[in-house]
């Protein structure tokens, strides 16, 4: 499951997608909109995401392939929202099914960090005072 678009993220569907009788571990990461931004004391109202959709999907596929090359027989789901994402809502999710937990944890961390560093996705914060700011993606 590789997807990017305005639809809310269905983490249960992602978990079902990566589950397998051959896998003893499923690791997930869910990134949500928080009420403040690091280094900025203004209250955040929402995030707005824009993306180069075709290239982002290709990056997600490449990230999943790289993770399988490094950590073996994995099933990976990567989903990212576009458009407005309100406080507490999920904007990005990664799910990894693996025979062992170590590989699941490592591949999940690799996937989110690589996505943040590489995928053509841009984030604008909207603050409660009405101001907005484009925020750089960081891999950590």
Image: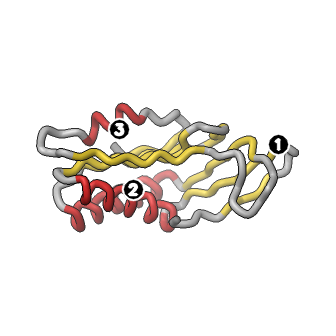
Front residue of this view, candidates 8 and 40: 40
Question: In the image as oriented, which residue stretches furthest toward the right?
Answer: 129
Residue 45: percent from the left, percent from the top? 75, 41
Is 19 placed above or below 104 here? above
CA distance for labels 1 and 3: 32 Å
Indicate the quadrant where residue 17 lies: top left
Circle on res. 14: 3
Q: Answer with mark 1 or mark 3, whichever residue precedes in sequence.
A: 3
Q: Residue at x 29, y 65 (%)?
A: 66
CA distance for labels 1 and 2: 32 Å
Circle on res. 128: 1
Front residue of this view, candidates 60 and 23: 23
Name the front one of labels 1 and 2. 1
Name the front one of labels 3 and 2. 3
Asked whether the viewer can see residue 129, the reply is yes
Of the 4 image quadrants, the one containing the N terminus is top left
Is 122 placed above or below 92 here? below
Alpha-carbon neighbours of circle 2 within 10 Å: few (<14), some, or many (≥20)? Answer: many
Q: Answer with mark 1 or mark 2, whichever residue precedes in sequence.
A: 2
Q: Residue at x 43, y 33 (%)?
A: 10
User: Disc 1, disc 3: CB below 8 Å?
Assistant: no
Q: Residue at x 38, y 46 (%)?
A: 28
Q: Which residue is mark 2?
A: 60
User: Disc 1, disc 2: CB below 8 Å?
Assistant: no
Question: In the image as oriented, which residue stretches furthest toward the left?
Answer: 22
Locate residue 107 relative to residue 56 in the image: left or right. Answer: left
Locate residue 66 relative to residue 85 in the image: left or right. Answer: left
């Amino acid at each position: 499951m590789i997807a990017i678009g305005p639809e809310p993220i269905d983490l249960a569907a992602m978990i079902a997608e990566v589950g397998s009788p051959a896998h003893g571990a499923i690791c997930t990461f869910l990134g949500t909109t928080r009420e403040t931004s690091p280094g900025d004391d203004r209250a955040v109202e929402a995030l707005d995401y824009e993306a180069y959709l075709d290239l982002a999907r290709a990056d997600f596929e490449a990230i999943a392939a790289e993770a399988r090359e490094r950590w073996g027989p994995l099933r990976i789901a990567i989903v990212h929202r576009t458009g407005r994402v309100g406080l507490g809502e999920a904007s990005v999710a990664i799910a990894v099914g693996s025979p062992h937990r170590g590989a699941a944890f490592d591949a999940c961390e690799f996937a989110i960090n690589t996505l943040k560093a590489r995928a053509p996705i841009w984030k604008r914060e909207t603050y409660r005072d009405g101001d907005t700011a484009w925020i750089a993606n960081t891999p950590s």
